[in-house]
Image: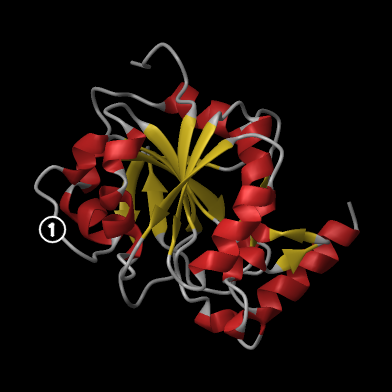
Amino acid sequence: MTIAAMPKIAMVMAAGFGTRMRPLTLNIPKPLVEVGGKALIDHTLDFLAASGIEEAVVNSHYLAHLLEGHLQSRKNPPRIIISREETVLETGGGIKNSLSILGNSPFFVLNSDVICINGKQPILHRLWNSWNDGAMDALLLLHKVSEAIGYDGKGDFFLDDGTLRRRKQNETAPYVFTGLQIISPRLFDSSPNGAFSLNVLYNKNLSRIGAIINDGAWLHVGDIDGLKQAENWLAKI
C-alpha cells in the first residue's frame, strides 16, 4: 500500500567529523571533499533534485560554518534547511532532532558520503513504489557487496524471501546498506533522547524494516581509498 504522492523532502546526514578521511578533513567538513571536481554534498543534493525532491534538511556540526556557507551559496534546487547540532547526535538522534521540520509523513534519508547512480529507474522512485505504509516503518536500499565501489567490509544484511536478517559477528553478508532509505516518523516512537544510532531502532523493529536491492551503482566515499576508487570510477563513465 503506497501513499499517493512521493515525498518531496529528504534528510541529508552531514554532521560527522569525517575522521577516516583525514588529513583532508582537518580543515574542511567531509561533505565538502571533492569527488570528480564536485563536493560530496553537491553530488547528493543534485541527485535529490534530479529525482524531484524539493526540500533537503541537512544536519551540521563539525566545521558547520564552512558547510553552511557552501550550502547558502548554492543556486540550484532543492531548497535547503539547516539543522545545526550543538553536539553530534549520530544518525538516529540527528533525524529525531529534525522531525519537526521533516513533518508527519514518510521522508527520504541519505548519507552525504556516498554517490548513488540510478539504474533502470530512478532509485528514489523505486524505493517509493516498494513502500508499504501499513507494514513498514523504514525501507532500506541495499547493494551487493561484490559490486560496491570503495567498500571493503563484511556487509550488513541477508535478504531471504523478502525477510531482512542482520549479519552475525562471524558471518559475511551479501548486502551492504547504502545509507539511502525511506523512514516513517513512527520509527521514532519510544526512541531514546540525545545521541543514538538508527541501528538501535532497526534492531528493535526489524520485522517492520523492508529492503530492496539497488540496480544502479553505489560509491562509498568513506575514507581516502574510497575517494580514490570513486574518482577512478567516475573518470571512466
Residue 137 visible in the displayed image: no
User: Can you say which quadrant of the picture contains the N terminus?
Assistant: top left
- Crowding near the residue tagged with mark 1, few <14, some 14–19, many ≥20 C-alpha atoms within 10 Å: some
Task: Report whether 207 appears left or right of 167.
Answer: left
Task: Report whether 221 appears left or right of 54.
Answer: right
Viewer-nearest residue: 77 or 95: 77
Residue farthest left in this picture = 190
Task: Tell me: residue 155, above or below residue 224.
Answer: above
Viewer-nearest residue: 170 or 89: 89
Percent coordinates x, y for residue 111 in the rendering: 51, 55
Give me the residue at 47% from left, 21% from top. Answer: 6
Percent coordinates x, y for residue 93 in the rendering: 26, 58
Q: Which residue is mark 1?
A: 192
Task: Tell me: residue 133, above or below residue 140.
Answer: above
Asked which colour scheme the image uses, the reply is: secondary structure
Percent coordinates x, y for residue 15 in the rendering: 45, 64
Give me the residue at 69% from left, 79% from top. Answer: 225
Which amino acid type is marked by label 1?
Pro
Give me the residue at 31% from left, 26% from top. Answer: 105
Percent coordinates x, y for residue 83 in the rendering: 39, 52
Residue farthest bottom in this picture = 23
Q: Secondary structure at mark 1?
A: loop
Viewer-nearest residue: 122 or 210: 122
Task: Report whether 144 appears left or right of 175.
Answer: right
